[in-house]
Image: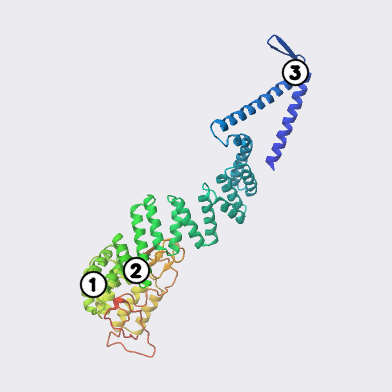
Amino acid sequence: MLWSLLKILVFIAVAAGLVYGTELILETPGEVTLAFAGREITLQPLGFLLAALVVMVVVLILLKIAGLIVAILRYLFTNDRDAITRFFDRGRERAGYDALGKAVMALAAGDSRMALLKAQRANAKLNRPELTRLVLAQAAEAAGSSEKAAAVYKDMLGDDKSRFLGIQGLLRQQLEAGNTDTALKLAEKAVAIHPKNNKGLDTLFELQSKKADWAGARATLSQKVRNNALPRDVGKRREAILALAEAMAAEAEGNTARARDSAYLANRLVPDLIPAAAMAGRLHAEAGEARQAAKIVKAAWTVAPHPDLAAAFAAIAPTETPAERQSRFAPILAIQPDHTETRLVSAELALAAEDFPGARRALGDLIETAPTTRSLTIMAAIEKGQGASDEVVRGWLAKALSAPRGEAWVCSVCNDVQGTWVPVCGNCGAFDSLVWTRPPETGHSDGTTAMLPLIIGTLGETSAGATQTAEDVTIDAEPTPAAGAAKSDTAAA
């Protein structure tokens, strides 16, 4: 509104200036004499101005004729077939570029209606569809006309210069609409056209990961590494994650051979990747390769002790007695003796062997310094095994139910807690985002770590001094591969 008013005021001022100037010239006395080739022409001031204007028009016409002659000569002697067309379209082109510029500025200013109008004019004036259609589609999207934008993007597919941009526009629309299947196909086409476009590769990789297309994701990852778009160490870790995902999928399908190959590859790429080490160790153990399984688990345990590694190490000899298991675990537990996981596993092994004082010594001060569902449940089992009263055992169990859950697989992007490790967060879809850490506290424990944790399975009756009543309190847990020869009776408090 203000700009329009300003233009009107400028027009009035220019018109008034011209009228004033004309009156001034008419009232000015004198003559203008032109002498040329022995001839003189005398003109009044106003006549001189009119003559000058005529000369300027003639010069412009002559220049236009000269330009046309040059275009014809180019067409005749250089075989430039577009020379004459360009000559006649020059003014049209200027108007088109002017409209295009105004459309871009309107987009930047957030004036979607003006942007759409100017973009349509530019598209009609210019023969540059790779430019005008893109701006037109963006203006249509800004104006809320997604259907019109989609139609323009589809038109862009017919031109080699604009095909990639058209696919990118349609891809973005499909992603916003949640049509991941169509988006995946469009992303594949975009990468096929421009394999070095890192943004397109990122989009394709994300879609392939969400669709569990691990083979395709590995191919995309390899292209990113070739493009030097990823550091080598990051590329290696992601390749290990994808290989592990392939192994998990193959095992679920019953393809043990493929699962082993992929799991072993993942472990070779990143030996301290806990899920890969645990799976590779377990598969080696199932194949009768106990020495290789132990080597893999110990290497990962040296970096970061973890319940999955302890379970994999226990699975190497599933039929051993609790005493034999304690003896076999001793070297691996000596690697990081003060680590929380080491102390918890030591306590659980002692419980399985009914060595309740040993379990208490292994647990140490964890129930005071870092109480969790797992450590407090172990303490309840110790008290139960040593013949403590029902009230004491119930007290520890009550503390366990309300204590922090302890470490778990937590998504670093959305903080969602996953029961087991997965390559893609089930909540937000982020790739390789799970870390083993304490989750944000929610004020209660959901018991996902099991009421009697990793090693001992179900605690049996462990003390002759413990008596059963009609109001038994049961300490249960799901049996694990590490339970081994632990007793599976139910202990009553």
Q: Earlier in the sequence, mark 3 or mark 2?
A: 3
Residue 340 in sight in this render: no
Disc 1 vs disc 3: which is toward the camera? 3
Q: Does 65 sit above or below residue 145?
A: above
Identify the disc placed on residue 370. 2
**Element at badge 3?**
helix
The residue lying furthest to the bottom in this view is 470
Around disc 3, counting alpha carbons within 10 Å, would you say few (fewer than 14), some (14 to 19), or many (20 or more)? some
Residue 242 x %, y %? 37, 62
Q: Nearer the viewer, residue 493 or 95?
A: 95
Q: Contact (CB < 8 A) between labels 3 and 2?
A: no
Q: Nearer the viewer, residue 481 or 375?
A: 481
Residue 226 in sight in this render: yes
Q: Nearer the viewer, residue 109 or 356?
A: 109
Around disc 1, counting alpha carbons within 10 Å, would you say few (fewer than 14), some (14 to 19), or many (20 or more)? some
Q: Earlier in the sequence, mark 1 or mark 2?
A: 1
Horizontal arrangement in the rendering, residue 408 relative to residue 355 (left or right): right
The residue beneath circle 3 is 45
Residue 406 x %, y %? 37, 69
The residue beneath circle 1 is 329
Q: Name the quarter where the C terminus is drawn.
A: bottom left
**Element at badge 2?**
loop
Horizontal arrangement in the rendering, residue 125 relative to residue 181 (left or right): right
Real-space Cα separation, disc 3 to disc 2, in angstroms: 102 Å
Residue 434 x %, y %? 39, 63
Real-space Cα separation, disc 1 to disc 3, in angstroms: 114 Å
